[in-house]
Amino acid sequence: MENLIKKIEERISVQLIHMTISNPRVKGGIKKIIIRPVQLKNEICFQKSSYEEKKVFHDNLTAEECRGQMVSVLEDFKQVELLTETERLTALISKKGKATVKIKKTECNCKERNLSHNRKKEYLIPEGTPIPYLVDLGVMTKEGKIVHSRYDKYRQINRFLEFIEDILVNLPKERLVRILDFGCGKSYLTFAMYEYLHERKGYQVEMIGLDLKADVMENCNELAVKYGYENLKFYTGDIADYEDENPIDMVVTLHACDTATDYALEKAVRWNAKVILSVPCCQHELNGRIDCEQLAPIMDFGLLKERFAALLTDGLRAKLLEEQGYQVQILEFIDMEHTPKNILIRGVYTGKKAGEETVDRCNALMNSQGTLQKLLRNEGC
């Protein structure tokens, strides 16, 4: 812990962009703390924002005061992420106080950093400029203002684009990038991806959206033609039956129900997709199959069993992707207050394969394999 505190103290300076301290050891109190530099009159201070369930408390500290609080603050949390103009520091803190620290060089365009005390969040899709697809989908007005009742959708779209921005380094810019969006629905995020990658970032993109609702796909195709998105196509079909002979660079699956997510992930692996972004939904498969004597007492409660089964399912999916050579992260897609289906599985192919031991141990909980494991190991479903 001393080493972590020293590294954090060294980085509490004007070069700090933000620091997030999260994953509290005790539930019911402060959920996370965000620290960032702000300019008050002619002085640089550090704004400490402490988030409870429905409240935020702000304190403006000097650099020394901020450094002085690190010991007591870090004792109550398990995770730290700190970003400066040149580095990203991440740390996990064990129950015994041992910190595992990773520091990675990064680049940040800080020429126009906003250090104002009450700065407004800068979204990748800025408010004030009308974007045709957001206007037609009812998120924006014709003047570019966000429709109040659709503000959560606007935040969700921007949050998703942040995940896209993080993996841009893995997408080739010298050739056509092919992306499949399984279970795209009304395609808010599909249109956002295409516009962001093609129009703003200059990628050559070919994107396909797939969903079971024919009338919705027909409307999406009409909108794509209207906007001049020549390489954005929508098809009606089932994820499990879809085949594509051409290379796929990225597979996206958002809220594909139950085992439909597994079929999408299996397709992505078979195609050697470089990037996978998946937000699972309605994980029912393992709910009736958990068979573990140690867990039996809590499995009597239906709600707990349902949630545990969902977490177990997504954990298995993540480990199976690691087994196939993906570097996997489990991330919060959007705040829980907006939707409970907020876990995003992000996989980037590295070729470094994890062993099967963890997956096999997890499967022992239910004495059988899940759909994705059977698909990947060619054992049928």
Image: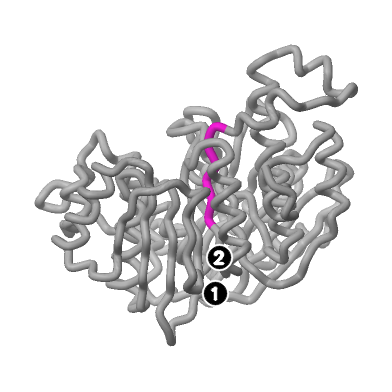
Q: Secondary structure at mark 1?
A: helix
Q: Distance of mark 2 from mark 1, alpha carbons?
A: 8 Å
Furthest-top residue in this view: 300
Main secondary structure along the magenta-highlighted residues: strand
* Amino acid at pointer 2: Val
* Amino acid at pointer 1: Asn
Residue at image point 60% right, 69% down: 272
Nearer the N terminus, badge 2 or badge 1?
Answer: 1
Does residue 254 show up magenta in the picture?
no
Q: Which mark is residue 275?
A: 2
Pick the residue in front: 197 or 50.
197
Does residue 279 show up magenta in the picture?
yes
Furthest-left residue in this view: 142
- The stretch of residues the image draws in magenta is 277-282
Q: Which residue is mark 1?
A: 170
Pointer 2 and pointer 1: residues touching (CB < 8 Å)?
A: yes
